[in-house]
Image (cartoon, rainbow, N blue to C red):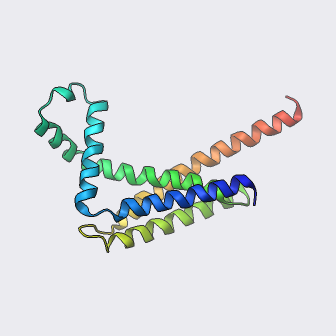
Amino acid sequence: MKKCKKIFTLMAILWMAAIFFFSSRNADESTAQSNRAGMLAGHLFVRGFDSWTEQEQLDFARKIDHPVRKTAHASEYALLGMLLFGAMTGTRRRRMCYAWLAAACYAATDEFHQLFVPGRSGQFTDVCIDSVGAVVGILAAAGISLLIFRIRVRHRQGR
């Protein structure tokens, strides 16, 4: 296996461990993390957020909790899809299919795992969101891979 593939494989395994860790957090810890992300979003994207009362800021964070969580799901799996694509061998199309299959299976097992975490639940919709996130990451990685391939071909041809 090429050194690059080994690095992508290791990175994918480490990222899967991170996803497992996030999923292992109980409902209170997960909610607190989402609220922190909502507060950060408020500070970054809402004009005058700093002048709001603490309660108004917390209400805002709670209001955007659902989209924050779903965006986090998709983003986690977009990165996983990119890493898995880089770890796979074969044609670009096969790498895309295998990476998606691996990410979708991991998403399903991750949601199953959440059934055993206090206050958490496994959701089929989250598996779908995770799978779509993986597709986005895989398409991005495949596009970058194709671009690098074309640059190398042109360089070899002396253009």
Residue 137 coordinates in the image, percent (x, y): 54, 50
Residue 113 coordinates in the image, percent (x, y): 38, 72
Where, by quadrant of the figure, is residue 12 drawn? Answer: bottom right
Is 97 or 156 nearer to us in this picture? 156
Whether residue 55 appears in this view of the structure is yes
Residue at position x 51%, y 51% in the image: 79
Quadrant of the frame with the N terminus: bottom right
Where, by quadrant of the figure, is residue 2 drawn? Answer: bottom right
Quadrant of the frame with the C terminus: top right
- Does residue 57 appear to the left or right of 10 in the view shown? left
Is 28 or 139 nearer to us in this picture? 28
Is 114 or 107 nearer to us in this picture? 114
Determine whether 67 is above or below 48 in the image: below
- Does residue 63 appear to the left or right of 30 in the view shown? left
Whether residue 96 appears in this view of the structure is no
Question: How many marks are shown on the rendered structure?
Answer: 0
Residue at position x 28%, y 57% in the image: 30
